[in-house]
Amino acid sequence: MIMKKNFQLIRNFASCRKGMAATEFALLLPVMFTLFFGMLETSDVATANRRAAIAVNTISDLAAQSTALTYDDVNNLIGGALQILDPAAGAVLNVNVVSVIADPNGDPIIHWSRDELGAQPYTPGDSYTSLNDNTVLNPLGSLIVVEITYPYSPPFTSYFVSSPVVFAKTSIRWPRLVSKVQLCDNNGANCTT
């Protein structure tokens, strides 16, 4: 009798389907969770990439529309880019605004440069090696080159992956109003030549 009762309990347990949905949900929950947050993180990274591209293009376009820039003008352009990017607290963002000219041999050299700290990241007269094609340089003019390096840490993934996604963007523009955009001190004097 006990054996028959035990056999009946085993058969009832095997045919019971009441907890099947809960079990399937428990098995699928991690997959759905990963897909959902993976899509959110991918969207955030794509947005940060687009913001970096917009910022670098905006700075170069506005700088190329000037005849001369002061130190404050360049700082304001970079400040505007920081507002476009909206970097997380503690993010080390690097922005360089560079004027590149051709030396007598036609090789690119630094005319002037400024960075987000108000410093001079490149020494005037030094070679500039980041141009992909030196033929874009006009021997009598300059190019405005803006470089941005933006380390972006996605909010959720940063708990699992310690290294951020680094966006390195460059934008190049020819000056529109003059052959060479000059850099002047804040008084408008002591301009580059």
Image (cartoon, rainbow, N blue to C red):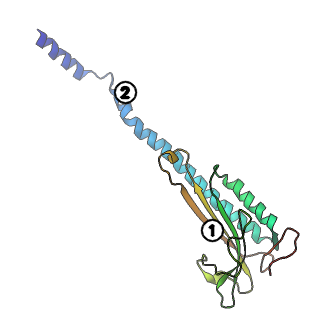
Q: Nearer the viewer, residue 39 or 166?
A: 166
On the rendered structure, is 174 left or right of 5? Answer: right
Residue occupying image coordinates x 67% and y 52%: 86
Name the front one of labels 1 and 2.
1
Q: Residues within 10 Å of mark 2 (few under 14, many from 20)?
A: few
Q: Position of residue 81 (x, y in %)?
A: 71, 59
Q: Where on the picture, by quarter, is residue 59? A: bottom right
Disc 2 marks which amino acid? Ala
Give me the disc on residue 11.
none
Q: Quadrant of the C terminus?
A: bottom right
Residue occupying image coordinates x 68% and y 60%: 55
Say which residue label 1 marks: 170
Q: Position of residue 172 (x, y in %)?
A: 67, 72
Q: Are marks 1 and 2 in contact (CB under 8 Å)?
A: no
Say which residue label 2 marks: 22
Q: Residues within 10 Å of mark 1 (few under 14, many from 20)?
A: some
Residue occupying image coordinates x 63% and y 78%: 128
Q: Position of residue 32 (x, y in %)?
A: 43, 39
The correct choice, above or below, for 95 with respect to 155 in the image is: below
